[in-house]
Amino acid sequence: MKRLLILTATLAAMAGCSSQPATVATLDVTRIQANWPKFINYSNQLASDTDAIQRSGASVRQKQQQLDALRRRYVSMQDEVTGDVRNAAAQVANDKHLRLVVTRQFVGYGGIDITPDVEKILRITEKPSPKP
């Protein structure tokens, strides 16, 4: 009788857990970085500018000043794209009544993947995988 009571209580608790919708979402930041033209263009532009500064014939002091300005521009661009992704993720989370959004890279399993919804808001189209 005691075992039956414990089993019944356990099943009731498990049933209660399964009826609650998931409130945690995951976002695949790597996929967004790989497919978002805005992010790709910023990355390419910064890499090109860094390379041009390094190869220039400017003095070490001038190169350092140029690199400092480039770092400030990098931070500004990083803030911009991070804000765009954060706002899109917040909009999706709000629409789907989700409580928490975490990056997929740090989650072993679980959660609702909202990456496609965020990509839609950011107008990202996934590139097809290359065929072997």
Image: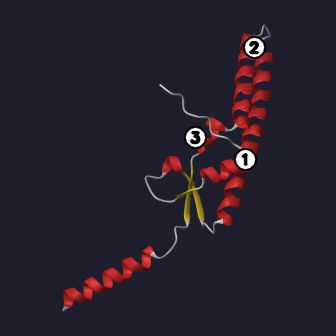
Would you call the spot at circle 2 few (<14 residues within 10 Å), some (14-19), or many (20 or more)?
few
Q: Which label lies toward us, 3 or 2?
A: 3
Question: Which residue is outermost to the top?
Answer: 57
* Residue in the image at 58% along x and 41% along y: 31
Q: Is residue 91 above or below residue 54?
A: below
Q: Which label lies toward us, 1 or 3?
A: 1
Across and down, in percent, residue 115 comes to 60, 50
* Residue in the image at 65% along x and 62% along y: 93
Q: Earlier in the sequence, mark 1 or mark 2?
A: 2
Q: Earlier in the sequence, mark 1 or mark 3?
A: 3
Type of the residue with mark 2: Val
Give the labeled residue for mark 3. Answer: 30
Across and down, in percent, residue 8 comes to 29, 86
**Regarding mark 1 in the picture, which secondary structure is present there?**
helix
Q: Nearer the viewer, residue 12 or 72?
A: 12
Q: Are marks 1 and 2 in contact (CB under 8 Å)?
A: no
Mark on residue 35?
none
Across and down, in percent, residue 27 comes to 58, 51
Q: Is residue 103 above or below residue 64?
A: below
Give the labeled residue for mark 2. Answer: 60
Q: Estimate the spatial distance between the alpha carbons at disc 1 and disc 3, rounded to whole Å.
A: 15 Å
Type of the residue with mark 3: Thr
Q: Estimate the spatial distance between the alpha carbons at disc 3 and disc 2, rounded to whole Å.
A: 35 Å
Give the labeled residue for mark 1. Answer: 122
- Horizontally, residue 22 falls left or right of residue 115, namely left
* Residue in the image at 60% along x and 55% along y: 114
- Horizontally, residue 37 falls left or right of residue 2, namely right
Would you call the spot at circle 3 few (<14 residues within 10 Å), some (14-19), or many (20 or more)?
few
Q: Nearer the viewer, residue 103 or 58?
A: 103
Quadrant containing the N terminus in the rendered view: bottom left
Label count reads: 3
